[in-house]
Amino acid sequence: MSFPAELHLRALPGFPQVTDGADLASLTVEALRRAALQLLPDDVLVFAQKIVSKSEGRRIELAEVTPGAAALELAQTVQKDPRLVELVLRESRRVVRAAKDVLIVEHRLGLIMANAGIDQSNVFNPADGEFALLLPEDPDASAARLRKRLGELTGREPGILISDSFGRPWRIGTAGVAIGCAGFPATLDLRGQEDMFGRPLRITVVGHADEVASAASVVMGQANEGRPVVLVRGLTLRAPSQPAAALIRPQQQDLFR
Amino acid sequence: MSFPAELHLRALPGFPQVTDGADLASLTVEALRRAALQLLPDDVLVFAQKIVSKSEGRRIELAEVTPGAAALELAQTVQKDPRLVELVLRESRRVVRAAKDVLIVEHRLGLIMANAGIDQSNVFNPADGEFALLLPEDPDASAARLRKRLGELTGREPGILISDSFGRPWRIGTAGVAIGCAGFPATLDLRGQEDMFGRPLRITVVGHADEVASAASVVMGQANEGRPVVLVRGLTLRAPSQPAAALIRPQQQDLFR
């Protein structure tokens, strides 16, 4: 296995606002064309979770959410809107930590994350009501669909990552992670490889898609930068593709708990 | 605050083996020259922890380590060499988790990590004895020294990161993190910024140096790729410099515990 010695990341300029039902692949092809870029072999495209969710109609109007008893009680603890808490609970398997301003859950996808990934930033114009945006139903499937559709439109199927920003235990600040993945090795398994003196490597599995998602996050920005799609060029790995679900550590295997 | 729209990462080719007492800044200047690269304003250099430790003489011969009673007992639990466990305990404030093949500690620097970051891969030729490599004594100070020395040699002080690969709770695989930082904003504080509709941003602090360290990790590789220094070009942030210590979340503020 050989790692690339150079990597280039470029946010596609002028990506338009994404609305419910938008064809993200077509918007991406147009954005590539405007930037005079063609997809090359081994190119990877990283999509911010937010625009994938928007294109899949995962925006929920809060006026239509009725919080149940559990949400009402939890909302008192975390001091959040009970309708948002209701959505978080619907999207979650269990609450990991609840305190004032803090609601960490295990998302139904297995992700341990704040607020089940539900976000309101850049999601609605207050003149239209109040909305919240859920994660895609199945981000790995979303990535696979994007990859297939881009293949149909361009004749070239790039690797696809869907990225989000996660808070982390023990570390300050968020880092990009991959919640969806297609045509890309979510992890790199180095087991069996040796160091230069023939000793087995200490590090055996690399969270490759998370590292690339973190790299893409640097050029996406977090606010209203309008750069939700990043072209990553230079990756030459030939490891087998895996979904981003491969990055989720089963609870019973978690060495840190 | 404006995020860069493009980022370029390049591992310096042909970086030599680093030995005790090596002048890492001089080796870097030579490697830049061989690659016909000059430092530009805003350039950042990411150094693998391993070569910083080596240059600072942090290699310990295990034959000279006598494990104490605590190390002998813990070594039984984790099934590791008692001399290594002794070094781990000397470098740590407390043991976070110990089980067969697992030894997670709080390093004296505050980092929660496996084996106190002590590594043996690519550290010694078995013909010379058995060695282990500790983290730098003070990685932020190491980064500051490298930055100053590079400034003396080149007339330009680049941003400096010292990176390591950490396992992560809940996620499979390692990701690059910054354990040392100079002339670079370890975190980006977006508090007070608004989305495109005037709502406060959900994400308020970004683990910027960790994201850049993860990006660099992609081109460093993990094995004997011989690419321990990465030039990162394109960052244009004007946020204040912070040490990597700013990325360590105080235990009492950890939202996930």
Image: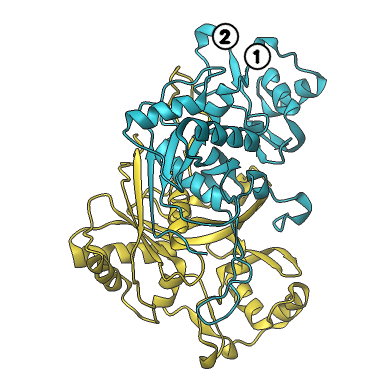
Chain colours: A yellow, B cyan
- Residue at far top of view: B127
Mark 2 or mark 1: whose residue is earlier in sequence: 1
In the picture provided, is A37 more to the left or to the right than A196?
left
Where is the C terminus of chain B found, in terms of image quarters?
bottom right
Task: Determine whether A152 is above or below B223 in the image.
Answer: below
Whether the residues at callouts 2 and 1 have beta carbons within 8 Å, the answer is: yes
Q: Between residue A152 and residue B219, name the one nearer to us.
A: B219
Q: Please name the amino acid that badge 2 sits on.
A: Gly
Secondary element under disc 2, as helix, strand or loop, is loop
Secondary element under disc 1, as helix, strand or loop, is helix
Q: Position of residue A183 (x, y in %)?
A: 32, 53
- Residue at far left of view: A155
Q: Where is residue A90 in the image (x, y as percent from the top left)?
A: 60, 75
Q: Which residue is the site of mark 2?
A: B129
Residue B62: assigned label: 1
Q: Between residue B212 and residue B60, name the one nearer to us.
A: B212
Task: Determine whether B85 is above or below A118 in the image.
Answer: above
* Chain under disc 2: B
